[in-house]
C-alpha cells in the first residue's frame, strides 16, 4: 500500500509510484486449465490483481425461456470476493458488479461463434480474489483464455487493459493509487486485428489525451495478446508432451 500525501507526484524522474514507465504494463502471469470441474479455466495476475475465470458449456439453458433458436446465449458473472479489497466488501451482486458483468459479456460475445450452438448457453464466471484496479480488464483477459481452453469456437482472443491520466500524465494500466487519485481511467478490450469491443471512460481527457491514451491502451492489448497466446500454447505443448506416446499413427503433431 502506497500512502499519498499532498505533494503527490505520480511521475518522478520518468518513473511511476511502483517504478514503472508511463507506457509499461504491470507484470502479468497467466495459468490455463486451473479448475478440473470447469470446461475451461484461467488464473491471471495483473500486478496485484488476482482473478480466476471459469467457463461452462455450451450446455442446456436454464431457465428454458432464455433459449434462442438460432444461437447460443452468453452469460457472464463478475464477482468480487469480500476479502478482495482492504475494507470487507459486502458479499453478493451490486450495481457495479452488474455493470462489469454486462460490459464484459459484450466485450467477449462478438468473437464467440454462437450460431454453432443454438438453444444452448456459454456461462462465464469471473471471481476477483484480490483487487487493485483493473479487475474488469483482468477478468476479460482471463475469460477469453478460459473460453479458448474450453474449446469454444471463436474468431479470436480478446485482450483488455486500461490507460488513464494521473497528475496530468497519460499512463498505461493504472494501479489502485493512480486510479483512485488520478483524473481519468479508460479500460478497453480489443481483438488482435484491432476491433474494439469495450471502451469505457471514467473522468476527463482532452481530445489529444484521448487519442494518446487509446494508442497506449491498444499497444497494451497487443502485449497482453502475446502473453495469452503463449499461456495457451504452453498448456498444449505440455499436454502433447505428456501424451506424445499415445498419438495414433498417421496423426501429425506440430511442435
Ligand atoms: P476496475 O477494477 O475494473 O478498475 P473500478 O474502476 O470500478 O473497476 O474499481 C477500481 C478499484 O477500486 C477496484 O479494482 C478495487 O480495487 C476498488 N474497488 C472497487 N469496488 C470496491 C469496493 N466495493 N470496496 C473496496 N474497493 C473497491
Image: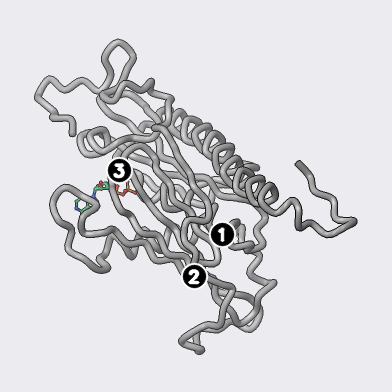
Q: Kindly state the secondary structure of the residue where label 1 is placed.
A: helix
Disc 2 + disc 1, Cβ < 8 Å: no
Q: Can residue 207 be seen in this view?
A: no
- Residue at 74% across, 51% down: 244
Distance from Cα at disc 3 to Cα at disc 2? 24 Å
Q: Does the residue labelled 3 lie within 8 Å of ligand 1?
A: yes
Disc 3 + disc 2, Cβ < 8 Å: no
User: Which mark is first along the chain, 1 or 2?
Assistant: 2
Q: Which of 127 and 108 is in front in this view?
A: 127
Q: Name the residue under label 2.
A: 123
User: Which mark is first along the chain, 2 or 3?
Assistant: 2
Distance from Cα at disc 2 to Cα at disc 1? 10 Å
Q: Quadrant of residue 185?
A: top left
- Residue at 48% across, 68% down: 37
Determine whether 236 is above or below 27 in the image: below
Quarter of the figure with the N terminus? top left
- Residue at 35% across, 47% down: 50
Q: Mark 1 points at which residue?
A: 147
Determine whether 148 is above or below 65 in the image: above
Q: Name the residue under label 3.
A: 133
Residue lying furthest top: 13
Q: Kindly state the secondary structure of the residue where label 2 is placed.
A: strand
Determine whether 167 is above or below 201 in the image: above
Q: Can residue 7 be seen in this view?
A: yes
Amino acid at each position: 500500500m502506497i500512502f499519498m500525501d499532498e505533494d503527490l507526484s505520480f511521475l518522478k524522474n520518468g518513473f511511476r509510484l511502483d517504478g514503472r514507465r508511463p507506457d509499461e504494463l504491470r507484470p502479468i502471469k497467466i495459468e490455463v486449465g486451473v479448475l478440473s470441474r470447469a470446461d475451461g479455466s484461467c488464473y491471471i495476475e495483473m500486478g496485484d490483481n488476482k482473478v480466476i475465470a471459469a467457463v461452462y458449456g455450451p450446455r442446456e439453458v436454464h431457465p428454458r425461456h432464455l433459449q434462442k433458436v438460432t444461437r447460443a446465449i452468453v452469460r457472464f458473472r463478475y464477482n468480487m470476493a469480500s476479502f478482495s479489497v482492504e475494507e470487507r466488501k459486502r458479499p453478493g451482486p451490486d450495481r457495479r458488479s452488474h455493470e462489469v458483468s454486462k460490459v464484459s459479456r459484450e466485450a467477449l460475445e462478438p468473437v464467440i461463434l454462437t450460431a454453432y450452438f443454438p438453444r444452448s448457453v456459454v456461462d462465464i464466471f469471473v471471481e476477483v480474489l484480490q483487487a487493485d484496479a483493473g479487475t474488469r480488464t483482468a477478468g476479460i483477459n482471463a475469460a477469453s483464455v478460459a473460453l479458448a481452453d474450453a474449446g469454444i469456437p471463436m474468431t479470436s482472443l480478446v485482450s483488455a487493459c486500461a490507460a488513464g491520466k494521473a497528475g496530468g500524465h497519460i499512463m498505461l494500466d493504472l494501479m489502485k493509487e493512480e486510479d483512485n487519485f488520478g483524473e481519468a481511467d479508460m479500460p478497453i478490450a480489443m481483438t488482435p486485428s484491432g476491433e474494439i469491443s469495450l471502451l469505457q471512460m471514467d473522468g476527463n481527457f482532452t481530445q489529444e489525451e484521448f487519442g494518446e491514451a487509446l494508442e497506449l491502451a491498444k499497444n497494451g492489448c497487443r502485449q497482453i495478446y502475446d502473453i495469452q497466446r503463449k499461456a495457451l500454447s504452453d498448456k498444449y505443448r505440455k499436454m502433447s508432451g505428456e501424451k506424445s506416446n499415445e498419438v495414433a499413427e498417421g496423426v501429425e503433431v506440430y511442435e
